Structure formats: C-alpha cells, structure tokens
Amino acid sequence: MSNIIDASNLGKQYQLHHGGLFANASLKESFTAFAGRLRGALHSVPLEQKKIVPQKSESFWALKDLSFKVVQGERIGLIGSNGAGKSTLLKILSRITWPTTGQVKIKGRVSSLLEVGTGFHPELTGRENIYLNGAILGMTRAEIRRKFDEIVWFADVEKFLDTPAKRYSSGMYLRLAFAVAAHLEPDILLVDEVLAVGDASFQKKCLGKMKDVGKEGRTIIMVSHSMAAIENLCTRVLVLDKGQKMMEGYPARMIQGYLNSFDGKDKALFIEQWEDRRGAGSIRIHSFCVLDHEHQPVNILVSGREYIFRFGYKARIDKAKSIDFSFTVSDMAGRVLFRNRTLESGLDLPGTLCPKGYLDCRIPRLGLTRGRYTFGFTMIVDGVESDHLPGEQALCFDVMDGDFFGTSQLSDLAPVIVDHKWTIKGLKR
Amino acid sequence: MKTNTNDFEIIIGSDVPAGSVLKDVWQYRHLFYFLAWRDILVRYKQTLAGVAWSVIKPLSTMVVFTFVFGRLADLPSGQVPYGVMVLAALLPWQFFTHILSSTGNSLVSNASLVSKVYFPRVIIPVAAVVVALLDFFIAFALLVGMMLVYGVWPGMTVLLLPGFMGIAILFSLGTGLFVAALNVKYRDFMQLMPFVLQFGLYLSPVGYSSSIVPEGWRFIYSLNPMVGVIDGFRWVLLGETALVYWPGVFISVVLSVVIFIWGLKFFIRNERDFADII
C-alpha cells in the first residue's frame, strides 16, 4: 500500500524573544530593527541575517530531522516527555504551523482535534455550536445535518440544545465538543491528548468511538500520555525525544522502552549504606529493583502488567530455618495498601544460603492505579529481626495507567485494583 | 462517505510558496459562512436594544454633527438638509471604520482558532466584512427613511452606489488585512487604530461638505480614498454633482485597488507564522 503520509527531514525552529519592542535597545536601534522587520515581513529571519538585528533572541528546535512514513489505516501513537515535539508535529501535519525545514506529503483529507471545543462560542446555543464547530473542524453543512442527531445522542444533550453553551456544565460542554469531533470523517485524524477529558464513563465512550474510527480504515495519529490508550488503540508507536525520533515500532515494546528511558542509570537501587535501619544483620538487603516479565529492569510500572520485585541480599550465615521477609506498600498519604509476606504466601528455602543472592517477589498483574507509592520491608531470620526499613518515605516507585482488565477502562478512583469478574443471572420465578 | 484519497494531495514544506493557500479558500467556504453567521448571531446577544444599536450609532452621530457643524459652525449643505447630507456620508464612513476595526482585530480575537485549527486565515477577516455589510444595510434603511421625509430623490446615478461601496470595501479590507497581520505580532496597532480613525473622521468630508475645501487643496485632500467614496455617495444619493472631483475619484479607485492587493499579499506572506506568534 502506498504511503498516506510521507515526511522527510522535518524541522521546526522557534525564536524566543526576550523583552518587548524597545527592551534593551536605544530607540533608534529598535526603530531600525522594527523597520527592518516590517520590510522582511514577520518571517523568521534566517540565522545569518539575525546578527544584524540588534535584538536579544534565542532559537531552539522543537523538531529536528524527523522522517517517517504512514500507510493508510495505520494508527500511530506519539509518545515522549513534555517538550519532545509531539504537539509541534501534529501542528505541522495539520498545517497550523509551518516547518522550518523538510517537507511532508499527505494524501487525503486531514482533520485535527488538538483541543476539545475549539471555536465553541459561549453565547451560542448547543445546536448553533454543533454547526459552527463542525464547520471549524472541516465538515460541510450537509455532513453536519446528516450527523446531527447522532452527535446529539452521543453527547446526551437533547434537553439543552437551545440553551446557550455558557449555561452548560463543564461536563456537558466537553461531551458536546467531543461528540462533534468524534463524528468527523476525514481520511486522516490527528488527535492531541483529548481523550483525557470527562468522567470515566464518557472516556470509555470516547475510546470506543476512536476504536470504531480505526476500524473504518481511517488513519489516526494520536498523542497521549495514557499508555493504556496508546497500547489499546495504536498499531505503531513513535517515541520522540527532544524533537527527534528516539525509536519506532510495536506499541508494547515502545511503551516499555520509553518508560525505561527515564533516568536510565540507577535501575537497581543500592541501599546498603542507608542508615535508618534496624536489625541484627545476619541477612541484609543491599539492593532493590523492579523487573518486567522479560527480566528487564524498569523505573516506571504500568498497572496490570507482570513485575518482579527483586531484593538483593547479603548473608553472613549459610543456614536459616525460616526467613520471614515482607514488604509493605503504602500510598503517599501513608495508608498501608497491602503487604506481601513470605510467611503467608510461602517460600521454599534452599539447604545452604549463598553469601549473596536475591529474593524475587513475582506479581503477575500489578493491581495499583496511577500514582506514586512508597514501601518498606522487614526481614526476620529465625524469629530475630535481621533487617528493617520503615515504610514511610523509604523507597518509592511510580505507576502509570494501564489496561488492567483489558477493557480499555482505567480505574483511578481507588489506589488498589482487585482482580475480579462479574456475571449476571436471572432467577426464574 | 469515503472520498477518493487521491483527490487531495497536500505538500507541506519549507519551500512551498505561500500563495498556495488561496486554492483552499473555496474548499473552506462553509467555514466562511459559519464564521459570518456566528458574528451576526453574537453581535447583539445580551443587549437590550439589540439591532437598534445599528440605527442608534449613525443617528446619534448625525444629530451631534448637524448641531456642531450645521448650526454652530453654520457650514453649507447645498440643496439638501444638513442632517441628510451628514447621514449620507456617515454610512460609508461607519462602514469603513467598522470593516477596518473588526478585520484588524479579527485574528487576535480568534486566536484560539488560529492556533488550533487549519484553514486559510484570510477567511477570518473577510467574514468580518459580512457583519459590517449587514450594519450598513440597516443604517441604509434609516437614510432612505430620512430621504423620504425630506423629499430627496436620487436619480438613475444611484445604480453607481455598489461601485462606491466596492471602493470602500477594497480600501478598508486591504488596510484591515495589513493591520490584522501586524496586530498578530505587535498589538500596538490595536491601540493605534482608534486614534487614526478619529483623525480620519475630520480629514474626511463626513461632518461637512467637501465644497468648503479650498480649490488649491483639493488634490491633496483627495489622496484620502474615503474622500472620493463619500463624495460619490452624496452624488449618487443626493444628486450633489458639484461635489464630485473626478481626479479624486480616480485616485480613490487606484489607491484602493493597490492597497487591497498589497494588504492581501502581505497577509498571505505572513500567514504561516500567525499560529507561532499570536
């Protein structure tokens, strides 16, 4: 199949101006600069000429040398930290901003949804706003009329169609705005982090709608910080870093790679020197790290995934009758959420203990929602406390949204997710 | 509805000429309708007087000018009542200032659209002209009423009225496009505009007849394109043939066309940077 988007060497340079027209310059100087800028229009001045203009300005590349191709029907996820260039890329593809270097060839109608409710006018009624917003997003009047009822049904605002949008609750406002956008029928849809709006049930509706759009064979390029949404919707992921492409490939791998890229050095935490410890020290924990299902160390965890919490130990004894090791996970408010304890879940001890080794605790599906958690541990060897690190601010790890139940529905009301299944049965009378 | 994707091929690149956006204008005509429609709908929302404002503004100015220039200064008004003469000039003048100020501010007041959606930017200022046209027609009805009351009948020359309106549109839109583009970067123009329009009001024959301008100054006076437009309005509506200074009208036409083309070119040349600096 042919490429629907073909981008080569895209670059976007921004000028950062410091101060106003007359800042740090004599009146005459700034006037010449001003006249010069009028003549050279408002275009960004090429770098060589910039020296002539006596103005404090700095430039930076929001995107640099980015090349990629998209085939029709692909759903591309763009991930990267803030300032990686994701939004700039979407803005270039949607022709809002123009690249400084390179070019893109796009075959097909493009609609972009960079903000929910762009162009909504608070004084206009819901009905009027549907038409206005539709036209802004590139729909024709006939198209909007044809989809009108569906949009109203999706947004669930029938009763308020003739009420000015300024009287809407923020939820209604968002629902209506998204509903219009969701009924676009472009060949290529560009979406920027707009699924993160509304309540949980509406988010689910939106995700479902996006899936349908994908099924219709449309090409989607989306930016999201929700790894669950990306993994669920996308067929390919592009990871951007500081305006450049870091990697590209299958969603699951890219997401893991991206999450691992955060301060990559200290994956295992060496805690041997930590002072606030108690215990006799026959067996002491000296390091800690989290591994994913492929035994690769990770820094940020995703809910619903498999992880191994690995505690490296050093032993001064070679035999122990019982090892009672436990770690306690708390939320940032200090509430204890759960405790994993060898004594309860069982641990087969080897005949002899090596002086160095590790204790692995495998968690098949991490039942924590997005957030930061702290934990501490206790090691009791043969009934004697050997090592203890209190839980308060001892160690912490971060969890990102993940698709725990495989339903694209995120749980975030409570910190802990308990695996379960629902059924419904009718009783015959 | 599945369009053949080969119908659209867009090339976005640093070396694509700026003028290529003009061919998109037709494709985005629906947006033009809706923006104009929005501006009309919103214009008098939450006002008590509503559309009456479109009448109150020219009417009150007419009363003041008639009193100051006609009574106190006792300036001549030819064969027609002073008020009618003033109103015939206020119409094109307010049309001009309305277009200029609304197009000049149009990009900034639609900043969220400019930075979040693509469309040929020229649609925004041009849509702003539609509201001015509507206001013009409402005020025009007022003038027709006044003419009926005072028994002033236009001749066949009234058919030339659209021509003079055309000049006014070209001049004001051309200037407005220029100001709109500059306003994106330097909001100073938003502050400057009321001043310039205030001076312009006295430099144009709105409150008085251009017959009081000394013959030797006539040419320089006519370098203001609105002079030709206003004299033209008075001529075709009130039959004041003597007012029309043909070299002046010629200058108006040429200047308006040049300014329009210049403004449009300037606008399109800078269009790509609007979203970055707005």
Image: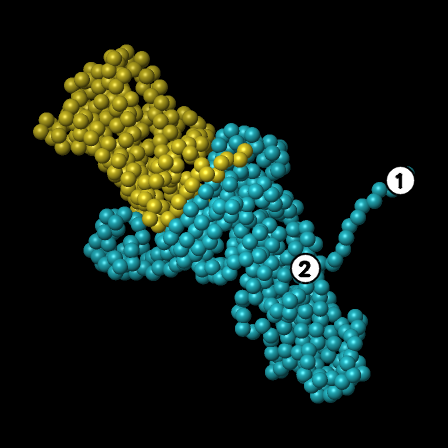
Chain colours: A cyan, B yellow
Amino acid at pointer 2: Gly
- Label 2: state its secondary structure: loop
Crowdedness near tag 1: few (<14), some (14–19) or many (≥20) residues, C-alpha within 10 Å: few
Seen from the viewer's position, the closer of residues B18 and A271 is B18
Seen from the viewer's position, the closer of residues A392 and A74 is A74
Residue at 23% across, 51% down: A36
| Earlier sequence position, callout 1 versus callout 2 | 2
Residue at 22% across, 50% down: A35
Disc 1: which residue: A428
Disc 2: which residue: A304
Residue at 52% across, 58% down: A248
User: Residue B87 placed where, x, y %?
Assistant: 28, 23
- Label 1: state its secondary structure: loop
User: Residue A308 placed where, x, y %?
Assistant: 68, 69
Amino acid at pointer 1: Lys
> Subunit of mark 1?
A
Q: Residue furthest front?
A: A1
Taking the image as drawn, is residue A352 in sight? Answer: yes
User: Residue B33 placed where, x, y %?
Assistant: 43, 30
Q: Is residue A400 above or below residue B76?
A: below
